[in-house]
Image (cartoon, rainbow, N blue to C red):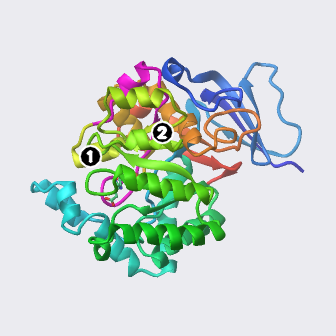
Amino acid sequence: MANQILIKNIKALVGIDDGNVLKKSGKQMSELGTIENAFLLIEDGLIKDFGQQTSNFQLPTSNFKTIDAAGKHVLPSFVDSHTHLVFAATREEEFEMRIKGKSYEEIAAAGGGILNSAKKLQAMSEDELFENSLTRLNEMMHFGTGAVEIKSGYGLTVKDELKMLRVIQRLKKVSPITIKATFLGAHAIPAEYKQNRNGYIDLMITEMLPQIASEKLADYCDVFCDKGFFTVGETDIILNAAAKFGLKAKIHGNELGLTGGVQVAVKNNALSVDHLEYTGDAEIECLKNSNTMPTALPNCSFFLGIPYAPFRKMIDAGLPVCLATDYNPGSSPNPRMSFVISLACTQMKLTPEEAINATTINGAYALELSKTHGSIAKGKVANVFITKQISSLAYIPYSFGVDMVESVILGGKVLN
Ligand code: NIG
Ligand code: FE
C-alpha cells in the first residue's frame, strides 16, 4: 500500500514550478509560483500532486495521513549549498578578540582561525566528531533545511581530511537530509608547510585527491582563493587536478578583496563561487558569461562586519544569485536559513521572493540538485516545511531571528 500524506487547507503553497527549472536569473528571481488555499499530496517520498482545494477536491483513495495546514504556508525545504558543519569546537575566544579590535585576517595570520579549528579537529576521534556533527545537522533540519553541502577543510593532514569526509559519508547514511560533500583541503596552509606551500599542494594532489576519489568521499573540490590563503595560480592548479579525479569546483572567492577568485572559478567552470563581498563590474561581466552560480553568505558579513555582496546590482544585471549559511565556528556560527533571508532582505535589498528563490531552487542548482530538490513540482523529493500560522510570506524575513518553521517533512516522512 502506498504511503501517502495529504497536507490540506494550506493558506499558501509557495515555490511551485513545472520541475524543469534549473535556476532563476534576473527578473525571474521575483517569480515564486504560489497557490492559495491549496493541498499537497505526497506519495512514497515524492510530491505526487498539488493544486487549489476546490469544493469538489478528491481525497486520496488509499491509507493516508492528513495534516491540516490552515493559516500556514508550505515551502520547499531550503537548500544550504555552503557549510562547514563538521567541526570540533566553537571559537568564542576569537569572537571576543574581534570585539576588541583584531580582524579575522590578523587572527588567522597569528595561527588562529582555521588553523585553530584544525588543531582541535585533529585531536578529536571520528566517532565524537560524527556525534557532534549529527546534533548540528538535526538542528539544521528543524530550521527548514532539506539539503546541505558540507565541506572538509579543518583536517589539513591526509588522515584528518579523510576523517572529516568519512564523517560526512556517515551523516549521509543515517540522516534523511540530502547531503553533498566537498573536499576543501585548500582551506589554509598548515603551519608546518608555511615555508613550503608547494609541498602542501603536492600532498593534496598526490595523496589526498587519489584516496578521496578511490573511496568516493567527495562530490566537489573547493579552494579558499583569497588574500593570505591560496593564490589564483595555486587555485587553478588544485582545481585542474581535482577535475582529473572527477570533482567539479566550488570556490571561496572575493571575501577579503578583489583577488581574482571569480575569474578563476569561471575559468574552471565552477558550479558556484561563494562569498563575493568584494565584487566589481569586471566580476559581474565575467559571471554573466558563465554557468557559475554567484553565492553570498550574509551571515559572514553580519558576523565579521565586512561588506555584503552587491546582490541587488547583480540581480539587476540579470544574474542568478544564491544564498547559504556558511555555517562554521569562525565566521557564521548559525545554521538558520531564515536569518540569511532576513539579512538578504534588510541588508542586500532582495525582496522576500528573490531571497526564497536564492535559498531553494538556486541553492539546488549550486549542488546539481535542481531536478529533485528546490521547488514544489510533481515527482520531486517531498522535502517541504510547514510554517506556523503567519500572515504573509514576507513575515518570514520580517520576523528576523524568530523560528517560524512548525513542522518538517523530508523524503515524505514527518520529522519528530
Ligand atoms: O567561509 N572563509 C573561509 N572559510 C570559512 C571560515 C572558516 C573559519 O573561519 O573557520 C568561511 O567563512
Ligand atoms: Fe565557507
Q: Which residue is mark 1?
A: 256
Amino acid at dot 1:
Leu
Residue 399 visible: no
Whether residue 324 is in magenta: the answer is yes
Kindly report the secondary structure that dominates the magenta region of the rendered protein: loop
Report the magenta residues as a range.
308-334
Please tell me whether residue 181 is drawn above or below residue 308 in the rendered image: below
Q: Position of residue 267 (x, y in %)?
A: 48, 40
Q: Residues within 10 Å of mark 2 (few under 14, many from 20)?
A: many
Whether residue 409 is in magenta: the answer is no
N-terminal of the two: label 1 or label 2?
1
Amino acid at dot 2:
Val
- Residue at coordinates 59% horizontally, 34% vertically from top-left? 74
* Element on which disc 2 rests: helix
Q: Is mark 1 within 8 Å of ligand 1?
A: no
Q: Position of residue 388 (x, y in %)?
A: 51, 38
Please tell me whether residue 411 is drawn above or below residue 24 in the rendered image: below
Q: Position of residue 46 (x, y in %)?
A: 75, 43
Q: Which residue is mark 2?
A: 266
Q: Residues within 10 Å of mark 1 (few under 14, many from 20)?
A: some
